[in-house]
Image (cartoon, rainbow, N blue to C red):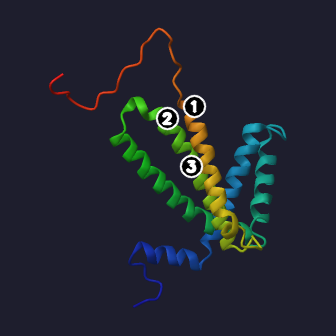
Amino acid sequence: MNDMAITSVVDLLNQWDRVGADYVLTFLLVFAVVFGILTATNILGKNKGVHVIIAMVIGLMSLKFGMATAFFSEVFPRTAVAIAVILVIVILTAVFVPKEHWGGWAIGLYSLGGVAFIFVMFNSFSALSWFGSNWWGDWGGLLIGALLIIGVIIAVAVSGNESNPNVTPKTPSFGPHYGS
């Protein structure tokens, strides 16, 4: 059988990997982001020809040492996993949490997104050996604990009800009260 025959999506992706598609994708991503920023901000005027040249130069220079390609190869799979985890939590929240409580859950989901961002970045940097120490192993637990405590404090502070002095507090009911 021919070594280059494509019989599955995995074969197609492997063939693209052999011909350097990761460099093409990295260039396209950097070019598109830089061009979009230059066009949206008009920081260098409205001449799109200048924007194209600058975006092309930055895109090509990002490929020079392979750092951008290696970083993208590490960060985007981890980002996909983080998005999948958050998406599952959003779906379960939508199914099991009443709509009137979604506001409080949104703060938690934003916080979870921030923590996921930190994990993705630290793990991507660590995989590329951009950290020269065992910092995450030494201080990771303390950082997570501090973030959780700060998150709880923010959640309590934001979700507090304003008390109305004209309303008497109700005793909570935990089901039918027989014989009363």
Q: State the separation of the CA atoms marked 3 and 2.
A: 15 Å
| Residue at point 78%, 47% (across, down) | 51
Q: Is residue 94 left or right of residue 80?
A: left
Residue behind mark 2:
104
Q: Secondary structure at mark 3?
A: helix
Location of residue 87 in the rendering, given as x and y in whole percent from the top left corner: 45, 50
**Residue at 23% over, 31% down:** 175
Q: Which image quadrant is residue 116 in?
A: bottom right
* Label 1 crowd bin: few (<14), some (14–19), many (20+), radius 10 Å: few
Q: Are marks 3 and 2 in contact (CB under 8 Å)?
A: no
Tell me if residue 21 comes above or below residue 33 in the rendering: below
Of residues 175 and 68, the one nearer the viewer is 175
- Foreground: disc 3 or disc 1: 1
Upstream in the sequence, badge 3 or badge 2?
2
| Residue 145 horizontal/vertical position (percent) | 61, 55
Q: Which quadrant, please, contains the N terminus?
A: bottom left
Label 3, residues with CA under 10 Å away: few <14, some 14-19, many ≥20? some
Q: Which mark is residue 113?
A: 3
Note whether 21 is above or below 96 in the view shown: below
- Kind of element beneath mark 2: helix
Determine the residue positioned at 55% across, 74% down: 16
Question: Residue 139 vs residue 21: left or right?
Answer: right
Front residue of 108 and 176: 176
- The single residue placed furthest to the front in the displayed view is 179
Furthest-top residue in view? Answer: 166
Q: Earlier in the sequence, mark 1 or mark 2?
A: 2
Residue 69: in sight, yes or no?
no
Determine whether label 1 and label 2 are within 8 Å by CB.
Answer: yes
Identified at 56% across, 63% down, the residue is: 78
In front of the other: 166 or 50: 166
Quadrant where the C terminus is found in the figure: top left
